[in-house]
Image (cartoon, grey):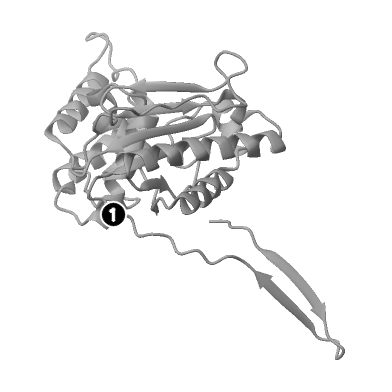
């Protein structure tokens, strides 16, 4: 995480150079998940929030929670959008965030960080954010989104939320972003009827609290149904495979047949590894949607 610092270069009479680095050492509170956490999934046009309970499940927002439009935003309809979903999910969207100039974008990131930290402070829960490595585990693959995401300073957004959280005394934790979108897509998106970003936020919160992501019976049945649909021939009289069945998808399904039955018995680090079931499930999701 990038934090501000000051550098002073001093040349001595002997010709030596001394460098003085000045930075603030701030002690961050250790997060207490007794009440759950506020999980956040960051995106180029805003953030997805999930109010995670102590049991690792989403819970409705506390009564009295109000998210007013910041003073300098809301000049036109849709400049600051708060999109609520059932069961404690929320998406805060600022469309200008993805296209604004550098100065304007820094201001908008600061506004967004203040709103998010205020929600966490009101809820009395720590903030959980992914330690971003954007672009390798998303289910957004269109060129327009990728171009927008590649130009967005996610590190600046994380740093702004971190500094605001420290200032307000809100605990803060970063977790690995590996497979969060894929897990959210397969396990929670349809269950809670939310966008994939909100589902990924739930996965981030559960990961911070130490919960494991098991492969459910419903997920196995869904993969089996997809396999049947892909292998079914459109015309019985014509040799060939079903629509969407490629060599890559065939190999993916073959690996899933071996890995799905043993996934739940693996250690947490093995469940999140690059050779786990989630990369194959991501490939399968992209091939059938």
Task: Say which residue appears at 35% left-offset and 50% top-offset.
Answer: 274
Q: Position of residue 94 (x, y in %)?
A: 55, 26
In-front residue for pair 108/194: 108
Q: Position of residue 275 (x, y in %)?
A: 32, 50
Task: Say which residue appears at 58% left-offset and 40% top-offset.
Answer: 110
Task: Say which residue appears at 54% left-offset and 16% top-offset.
Answer: 78
In the image, taking residue 110 as reference, residue 179 lies left or right, namely left
- Assess disc 1: are there few (<14), some (14-19) or many (≥20) residues with their C-alpha within 10 Å of its C-alpha: some
Q: Quadrant of the C terminus?
A: top left
Q: Where 244 falls versus 263 (above or below)? A: above
Q: Where 249 falls versus 126 (above or below)? A: above
Quarter of the image where one finds residue 149: top right
Q: Position of residue 195 (x, y in %)?
A: 36, 24
In-front residue for pair 126/240: 126
Residue farthest to the front?
64
Count of numbered circles in the view: 1
Q: Position of residue 185 (x, y in %)?
A: 32, 31
For the question of whether residue 90 can be seen, the reply is yes
In the image, taking residue 43 as reference, residue 22 lies left or right, namely right
Q: Which residue is mark 1?
A: 32
In-front residue for pair 147/103: 103
Q: Secondary structure at mark 1?
A: loop
For the question of whether residue 280 can be seen, the reply is no
Quarter of the image where one finds residue 269: bottom left
Q: Where 256 falls versus 23 (above or below)? A: above
């Amino acid at each position: 995480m990038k934090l501000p610092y000051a550098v002073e270069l001093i040349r001595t009479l002997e010709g030596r150079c001394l460098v003085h680095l000045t930075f603030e050492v701030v002690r961050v509170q250790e997060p207490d998940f007794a009440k759950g956490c506020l999980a956040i999934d960051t995106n180029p046009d805003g953030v997805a929030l999930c109010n995670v309970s102590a049991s690792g499940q989403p819970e409705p927002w506390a009564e009295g929670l109000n998210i007013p439009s910041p003073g300098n935003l809301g000049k036109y309809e849709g400049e600051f959008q708060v999109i609520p979903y059932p069961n404690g999910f929320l998406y805060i969207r600022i469309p200008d965030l993805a296209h604004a100039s550098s100065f304007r974008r820094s201001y908008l990131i600061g506004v967004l960080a203040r709103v998010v930290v205020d929600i966490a402070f009101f809820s009395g829960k720590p903030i959980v954010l992914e330690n971003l490595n954007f672009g390798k585990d998303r289910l957004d693959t269109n060129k327009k989104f990728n171009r927008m995401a590649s130009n967005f300073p996610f590190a600046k957004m994380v740093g702004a939320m971190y500094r605001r959280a420290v200032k307000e005394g809100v605990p803060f934790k970063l977790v690995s972003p590996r497979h969060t979108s894929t897990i959210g897509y397969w396990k929670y998106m349809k269950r809670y009827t939310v966008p994939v970003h909100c589902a990924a936020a739930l996965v981030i919160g559960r990961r911070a609290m130490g919960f494991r992501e098991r492969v459910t019976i419903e997920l196995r049945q869904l993969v089996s149904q997809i396999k049947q649909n892909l292998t079914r021939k459109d015309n019985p009289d014509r040799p060939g495979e079903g629509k969407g069945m490629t060599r890559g998808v065939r190999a993916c399904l073959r690996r899933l047949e071996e890995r799905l039955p043993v996934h739940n018995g693996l250690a947490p680090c093995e469940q999140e590894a690059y050779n786990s079931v989630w990369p194959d499930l991501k490939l399968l999701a992209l091939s059938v949607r």
